[in-house]
């Protein structure tokens, strides 16, 4: 977003302060370790099913993964204008038995879905920030996200892909699911990393910006 402001509106970069979002810890801790709705590994896409979020890349990667790991279940949670198209594509690829559309989830349903998943994937084509990966990490799910998301600037203990690189996404999904040591490392390091993502810290940074522009008044 900062880059777009500079490039499209000619704003001096020195006048722009970036304050990243955080994540609420109130609910996720309560449902961490939720029981799985079915057996086997679960890979989750949770968000609006629109072009911006890259759901098509998730479906295509699922097809590649299932050729190697046939017992994995892919879950697409959410709603949006591309949902009918995604359902049709899943059917065309013959993935119906290993692919689940939950529809829109809310509140504790979302937290339970994160907690039941073995991997969360956010293949967004464009994402100003993206809080969902933080929520997934808080529920102790490893994360793969696109480099086109703002949150990719600040998260280190996640795997990153270019949104449209389906082959790389599929390979990284397979790696996390096949190597428990990798998944465990992502979760443990991610837990430590999340300590910095608090709304109190973000509020303090915004407060600092106000002090700066008002001359400390």
Image (cartoon, rainbow, N blue to C red):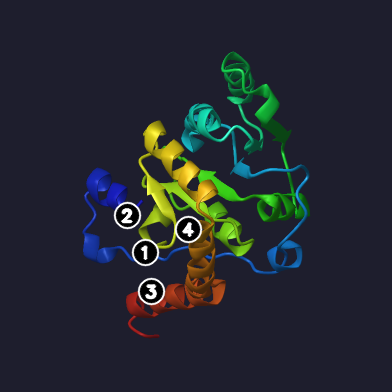
Residue occupied by mark 3:
209
Q: Are marks 4 and 3 in contact (CB under 8 Å)?
A: no
Q: Residue at x 24, y 54 (%)?
A: 11
Residue 2 marker: 2
| Residue 78 left/right relative to 198 | right
Calculate the distance from the C-alpha at mark 1 to the C-alpha at mark 2.
7 Å
Q: Of the two numbered discs 3 and 2 on the same chain, state the one appearing first in sequence.
A: 2
Between tags 4 and 3, which lies in front? Answer: 4
Going from the N terminus, do you reach mark 4 or mark 1 first?
A: 1
Which one is in front in this view, the residue at disc 4 or the one at disc 1? Answer: 4
Q: Which of marks 4 and 2 is in front?
A: 4
Q: Is mark 4 on a helix, strand or loop?
A: helix
Element carrying mark 2: helix
Query: Which residue position is annotated with label 1?
Result: 18
CA gap, disc 4 and disc 1: 31 Å
Label whose residue precedes the other's in the sequence (4 or 3) = 4
Q: Dot 4, how many residues are within 10 Å of its Cα: few (below 14), some (14-19), or many (20+)? A: some
Which residue has dot 4 on it? 182
Kind of element beneath mark 3: helix
Q: For residue 78, what is the image quadrant?
A: top right
Q: Nearer the viewer, mark 3 or mark 2?
A: 2
Which of these two is toward me, 159 or 56?
159
Q: How crowded is mark 1: few (under 14 residues within 10 Å), some or many (20 or more)?
A: few
Does label 1 or label 3 sit earlier along the sequence? 1
């Amino acid at each position: 977003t900062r880059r777009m402001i500079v490039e499209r509106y000619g704003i001096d970069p020195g006048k722009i302060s970036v304050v990243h979002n955080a994540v609420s810890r109130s609910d996720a801790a309560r449902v961490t370790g939720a029981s799985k709705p079915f057996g086997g590994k679960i890979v989750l896409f949770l968000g609006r099913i629109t072009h911006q979020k890259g759901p098509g890349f998730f479906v295509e990667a699922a097809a590649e993964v299932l050729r190697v790991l046939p017992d994995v279940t892919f879950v697409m949670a959410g709603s949006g204008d591309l949902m009918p198209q995604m359902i049709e594509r899943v059917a065309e690829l013959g993935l119906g038995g290993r692919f689940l559309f939950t529809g829109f989830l809310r509140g504790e349903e979302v937290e339970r879905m994160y907690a039941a998943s073995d991997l969360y994937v956010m293949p967004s084509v464009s994402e100003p920030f993206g809080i969902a990966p933080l929520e997934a990490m808080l529920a102790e799910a490893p994360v793969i996200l696109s480099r086109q998301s703002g949150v990719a600037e600040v998260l280190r203990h996640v795997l990153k892909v270019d949104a449209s690189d389906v082959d790389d996404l599929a390979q990284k999904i397979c790696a996390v699911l096949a190597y428990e040591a990798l998944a465990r490392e992502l979760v443990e390091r991610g837990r430590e990393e999340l300590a910095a993502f608090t709304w109190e810290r973000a509020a303090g940074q915004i407060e600092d910006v106000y002090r700066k522009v008002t001359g400390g008044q």
